[in-house]
Amino acid sequence: MRALYNDFVQTFGNVLFAVCLFLVWGLLTLIGVVIDQGKDASVYFQAYAPPLARLILRLNFDNIYHTPYYVGIIGLILLSLAVCTFKRVIPARLPPLSAVNIEKIRLHASIDVKGDPGSIRNRVEAFFRARGWHVRKRELGGTEWTFADKHNWARRGVLVAHAGFVIIAAGTTIYWAKGFSGDEAVITGQTVSIPHTQTSIRLNGFSYKIKPIVTKSGMIYQPIDYVSQVTAIGKDGLPRTATIRVNHPLDVDGTLYYQSSYGFALRFGVTHDGVRVPALSNRDYLTGDELALPGTQRTIAVAQFVPTVDRQSGVPSADPRVNHPAVFLQIFDNGQAAGAGLVPMNAAIDVGGGWRIIPQRYLLVSGLQYTHDPGVPLVGIGAFVLLAGLIISFHMLPARLFVRVDPSPAGVTIGIAATTVKGYDIFETQFNELVAELERDFNPREGAPKLNLAEAT
Amino acid sequence: MQAKMPLDEVLMIVALGAYVISALALLVYFFSREEWLRHLGIPLAIVGCVAQFAQLAARYELTGVWPLLNLYGSLSLFAAVSVAIFLFFAFRYNLWFAGGFVVALAAIFLAYGVTWNEGSMPAVPSLQSYWAKIHVPLVVSSYAAFMVAFVLSAIYLVKYYFERSLGRVTTSQLASVPAGSAIGASLLVDSMAVRPSVRVDTPNIAEAATHGNTVAQWLNTIPSLAQLDVLIYRVVAVGLPLLTLGIITGAMWAHESWGHYWQWDPKETAALFSWIIYAMYMHLHTRNAWRGVRTAWVSTIGFLSIMFCYFGVNIWISGLHSYKL
């Protein structure tokens, strides 16, 4: 059991294992980018060869981000991160002060100076202190050692970054546990009740602004604004009027209401043998709704509202502004398509059996989306903690200098070696400059520094 | 009577012209070592960069619409920030050898961006947000940093594989080339080196250079592989926090605009994919054995993922971020 635990810790605490998990996570994410998500199966059969489409559907690549293996890989990354944090990152925070073989460390140098070892040592310590190094002295194995650390606190950068990742995961989990979201298509004048909160929202009015613009590629109709005027009644029971626009949601009792889309509802005048049928005429129909004609197998589907029909050609225009509107109706008899037609407003269409339908008026519909996500503050905090961790880890270089001052035939030899948490190359230039400066400090008349940069091993 | 050209278009032409001449000068400089070419190319790159920022400001002033909301504007910023980041690192670390490649890429992207210019138009409602002034520059700046890292990675890989192609010293032996060896000391004295270095990790190139191999002579004058690796790391270390901040601000904007901070939209997930690759880079860079050619490859792949995220998703994949014009 102990061996199994050790294997687990060794595997999950290994950076390369974490990189492998990142690789799998990245590939799964890429699949989700390339393959359209959440579409009907027919879409995949249209877009891909049948065997590939079947594979996509069978492996749930059409909804990959919610598959057990996608969530699982993130879980494994969090596990690896936790093990790595406790077994590698935290224990490595403050490495003990210990004697080293200076010549064995790649970044090392020695400087020969004249004077007694005690005063030279004090001068070396003062030199490093003056340059922001945290200096400590130890006697190890009968030898006086001087240790100088810089940005030692930045060793915690990885820990901070990992903590940020965990906080984000916690915030996301809170949404899964306690959050909710949904959407409502609200017709002008209609009041809807939000099921999760019992908040009622009445749409007093909706407007949109679209501007035709001539570009180098031709005319386009650029949306400029979508505005819902609403009256909301929350938990306090007090009605409050508000405006909801894109990027300006309405907050009612911690639930945010967003402007997400718009559309049209239609009211028809339905007659049978010239007599108005109130049950079918006194209601509003959204796109996709159907009118079932009583006593027949016939249904009329409201396929699409066309804001503008070209008056000369009679075909739908690309202009989304309402100007000579029409409705595209489809007629089904016993479930089979029996006809279709574009019916201008206030024009009648005879659908057989004495039934006539007249599109009489249209109403604007506001698509409102609502979200309650108590995890957002935590996700936000986690994101900035992650960012702080990354900046600390990448831009602060914790380095340690090992210095010993030994008597030599020529006087005293100062031996210096340096290690960093990011290898030697990244500190090489700084180290050389530091040693050269130290050399100049002790031998100011010598001119160019005479570094005895020993060969690397 | 001919219509007067708007100021922003004039500045765009100035920037593009300056970049093209600068790129040519710096590319020839890379091969010829003629200092006057560097003295010509760098000021022109600065002129182009300044002209581009001025162009964006002029466009904003003339149209009243934040200019980064379409591919034309964002590519313009991308090119400008690429050159700006390069100039910063070049002044800091003496990276002029890479200038020709960075400025040439910036010019290509800028020229491509011009083909997307559809004139000025108001922003769609979801883009009418102060977040556009925060999120877009951050993300585009991260892309620009990754482009500079990509150029350095490509140079690293060329040097590394050329060294291997010479084949007289094996890769494993490379690691044990003594610092301060005679061959290194004699060959690294060059104005293009980042700093006087005691390390030479491409002895074959150094030796071939002394025997008149032209390619070796070009490659020998650029920093050592170890120094290039550090430079790539430093640039990625700028790009990754910028990308992270860009994703965070994008999530905050999405929360305000669409009701969810994360919608698994193709653009978001493509950015996440790039983030994952650069996170892999940073993790691999902590390992001695993986630092170098492998991380250079990861950086290269990372930039390809950035290009996919930038162009592939914007142009070919529809989603909430499909603001092509």
Image: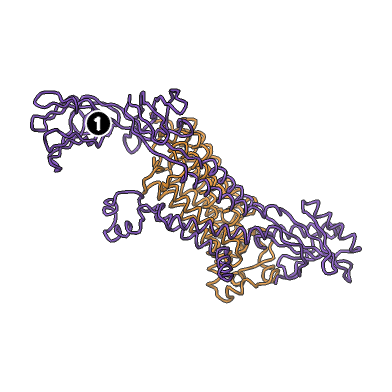
Chain colours: A purple, B orange
Quarter holding residue A121? bottom right
Residue A115 appears at what percent x and percent y? 91, 63
Residue B321 place in picture, x, y as percent: 41, 43
Please say whether residue B80 is visible from this viewpoint: no
Other-residue count near label 1 (Cα within 10 Å), few / some / many at <14 / 14–19 / ≥20: many
Q: Taking A203 as reference, is B255 above or below it? A: below
Q: Residue at label 1?
A: A285
B58 or A269: nearer the viewer: A269
Answer with left or right where residue B260 lies relative to residue B212. left
Residue at far bottom of view: B168
A431 or B213: nearer the viewer: A431
**A338 on left or right of A327:** left
Residue A137 quadrant = bottom right
Q: Amino acid at mark 1?
A: Tyr
Where in the figure is residue A236, as x and y percent of width and height?
47, 26
Q: Chain of mark 1?
A: A
Q: Secondary structure at mark 1?
A: strand
B161 or B141: nearer the viewer:
B141
- The total number of labels drawn is 1
Position of A113 relative to A316 (above/below)? below
Query: In this orientation, which residue lies closer to the viewer: A80 or A244?
Result: A80
Q: Residue furthest right?
A: A116
Q: Looking at the image, which residue is at 20% across and 36% down?
A: A301
Q: Is residue B43 visible?
A: yes
Quadrant of the image occupied by residue A54 = bottom left
* Residue at image coords 39%, 25%: A229
State the quadrant of the N terminus of chain A. Answer: bottom right
Can you give x and y, in whole percent of width and height, for residue B175 in the image?
A: 63, 71
